[in-house]
Image (cartoon, rainbow, N blue to C red):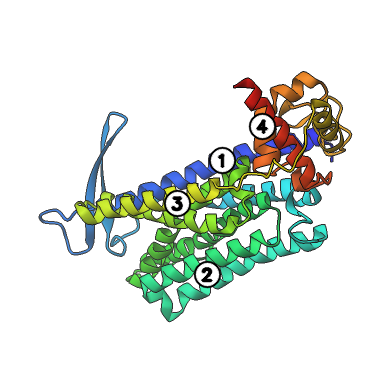
Amino acid sequence: MDPIVADWISLALRWAHVMVGIMWIGTSFHFIWLDASLRREQGMGDGLAGATWMVHGGGFYRATKYMVAPPEMPADLHWFKYEAYFTWITGFLLLAVIYYLGANDLLIDPRVMELTPMTAIGISVGSLIAGWIIYDLLCRSPIGERTGLLAFLVFLLACVASYGFAHVFSGRAAFVHIGAFLGTIMAANVFFIIIPNQKKVVAALMGGQVPDAILGKQAKQRSLHNNYLTLPVVLMMISNHYPMMFEHAQSWLLVVGILLFSGLLRLYANMKNAGASGSPVTAVLFYAAMVGMGAIAYASYRPGPDLESIGPVTFADVQAIVAHRCQACHSANPTDTAYRVPPKGIAFDTPDQIRRMAPQIERMVVLTKAMPIGNKTGMLPEERLMIAKWLADNKAGAE
C-alpha cells in the first residue's frame, strides 16, 4: 500500500476511534456516577433504587433508577451500545492497518522474538479471543460471586497478558496489545452480556412477566469492570508516543503499576461519587499517589552508559553513524519503502539538522533505544555509546 494512502486511512480510523471512544467512556463514566449518586427519597416506592438531581447547560434533570425494571415498557427507550461496538471495530481496524500491515517494522522485534508476520498476527488475534474467554469463564464461575477474589484474578490475568506480550512483540506493540486485550474484554462485556441481558429484561416486560433480577446484577457487574478498565486502556493506547514506557527492560512491571494506579484512582472517584469521605477515602488517593510515583521512578531509571571506555568522538563519527543507521527513514528522500516523507518531518541530511535534533536523538537513540524502530538497521551498542559520548561532550562544552 502507498505510504501516504496508509497514513490517510490511519488518520481516519484514529479520529473515528477517538471520537466513538469518547462517547463510550463518557456514557460509561456518567452512568457509574449516576448509579453511585442515587439517594432514596421520602415516599419512594419499593421498586425504586433511588433518584438523583443534576444541572447541566442551564437545565435541571431528575433521574430515577428502578430496582429491576419499570412495570411497563416506556414509549421511548434509549440504548447505549453502538459507542462500544464502533470503538472496538475502529480500534481493531487501526491495529490491523498499523501493526498487521506493518508487522515487520512495528509488531515484530527480532531482539524479543523471531516471528513471521502471519505467526505474530495469529498470536495477536488469538490472545484477544483467549483473554475474553478466560475472563468470561471466571465471571460465570462461582468465583464471580466473590467480588474481591474475582477482581484479583482479573488483575492477575492482565498481568500475565502483559508479561506475555512484552516477551513476544516489540515494546510499542506490547503496550498497544495490552490495551487491545482489555478493550476487547470491555466491548465483549457490552456485546455478550450487558445488551443481551437488557434485551431479555425488555422481552420479559413486553410479555407481561417479571424480569429476572440476576440479569441486571450481571450487567451491572460487567459495567463496573469496564469502569475500572477504562483508564489503563486509554493510557496503553497513547503509550506509543512515549518510549520511556514501552522500551524499558521490564516494561510489563510498569503495566502492573499502571493497573494498580488507575484502579485506585477509579476506586477513589467511585467512593467520592457515592458520598464517602474521611480517612479511608483519602488513604486510597494516597496509595494511588505512592504507586504512581513508584511507577514513574521505575520507568525513568536507567543506568548511565559507561563513557569512560569510549575515546574521543568527533561530529564526523556521529554523522557517519546517523547516515548509516537513521537516514534510510529520516531523510528528505527516504530509501526505506515504508516512507515517502521523513517520519514527523525529521531529517538528518545536514549537520545543522543533526545538531538541532540532538535532544531527541539522546531521548530516542541513547536513553530509550526506541530508534531505529525494531533496530531494523542494526545499530550497534558501541554506536549508541559513541553518540552518547558526543552528546555528553557537547553538554560539557556548553557549560
Q: Earlier in the sequence, mark 2 or mark 3?
A: 2
The x, y position of residue 33, in whole percent, is: 32, 49
- Residue at left offset 52%, top offset 70%: 135
Secondary structure under tag 2 reads helix
Mark 2 or mark 3: which is in front? 3
Asked whether residue 209 appears in the rendered view, the answer is: no
**Mark 1: which secondary structure?**
helix
The extreme left residue here reads 42
Q: Residue at x 76, y 54 (%)?
A: 109
Which of disc 4 and disc 2 is earlier in sequence?
2
Q: Disc 2 and disc 4: Cα gap in Å?
A: 49 Å
Which label is found at residue 135? Answer: 2
Q: Where residue 22 appears, x then y in whole percent?
A: 49, 41
Q: Residue furthest top?
A: 352
User: Residue 355: image x %, image y %?
Assistant: 72, 23
Q: Nearer the viewer, mark 3 or mark 1?
A: 3
Residue under label 3: 294
Name the amino acid, label 2: Tyr
Tell which of 143 and 248 is nearer to you.
Answer: 248
Mark 4 or 1: the one toward you: 4
In space, the residues marked 1 and 2 are separated at their CA atoms by 25 Å
